[in-house]
Image (cartoon, rainbow, N blue to C red):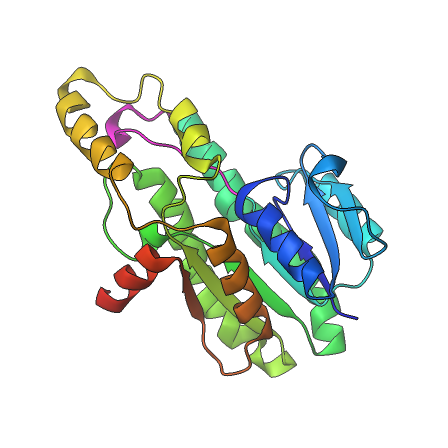
Amino acid sequence: MNTVLITGSSSGYGLETARYFHSQGWSVIAPMRTPRPDVLPESERLRILPLDVTNPESIQAALEASGPIDVLVNNAGIGAIGAFEATPMTTTRELFDTNTFAVMAITQAVLPQFRERRSGVLVNVTSSVVLARMPLVAIYAASKTAIEGFTASLALELEEFNVRVKLVEPGYGPSTNFTSNGRSRMNGQIPQDYAPFAQRVLAEFQNQTTVTHESDVAEAVWRAANDTTGQLRFPAGPDAIALAQFK
């Protein structure tokens, strides 16, 4: 039986991905910053563990508790909306700590077992912000674009050990908590001079009808984890797929 570890499994894309892999008969390890046993079914094939992806000791403890895994899905992430000019460097570092450096840290901790077994799959979840220019998300886009470059290089680096590396690029998902969480970091980050522009941008997002659902991402992660064709990027959701076609 295959085992997958999915970071950020408490809500949104991570939660739906955990449910999807479990429904396919896999053993699922679902780490969460704040464990929520009520969101996933009780099962011998499902374990919920505490994990702060920005804490090295927490990463080590979670991986020791997990045992061998076949697939690592780096899904945990945070967003922020605002004009770069008004974005504190503390917010910038917070995004990079979670979206970029934590992905690298967890990946580095898992790779020895993949290399030694000469098998394993790494799936890094980024965003459609890497597919097209989008305003008011400069820091978020930078943190995710860094993972795109990291993953593309790592895919070549690990071919020697039969370890597959993939990217999943979700589109805009208004049904998740991601947008609302990002807005919470917007306080004070839209100066008055930027307000008319920001209002237009946010209105366009609110009026967007072609969007990504949690199931789109779960299915894309599943395809990526099981792909043997060498494909690197898997846009997830109709809006992301459309952007990828014009990139």
- Give the residue furthest to the right: 44
Q: Position of residue 210 (x, y in %)?
A: 30, 51
Residue visible at 35% across and 39% down in the picture: 139
Q: Position of residue 142 (x, y in %)?
A: 35, 46
165 part of magenta stretch: no
Q: Answer left or right for 192 relative to 136.
A: left
Towards the viewer: 120 or 22: 22
86 part of magenta stretch: yes
Q: Answer left or right for 225 relative to 136.
A: right
Residue visible at 30% across and 40% down in the picture: 138
Quadrant in the rendering for residue 163? bottom right
Residue 107 in view in this figure: no
Residue 138 in view in this figure: yes
Residue visible at 47% across and 57% down in the picture: 216
The residue segment tinted magenta is 77-88
- 63 up-or-down from 51: above or below: below
User: Which image quadrant: the N terminus?
Assistant: bottom right
- 159 up-or-down from 211: above or below: below
User: Which image quadrant: the C terminus?
Assistant: bottom left
- 157 up-or-down from 202: above or below: below
Q: Considering the whole magenta stretch, tell me its main secondary structure.
A: loop
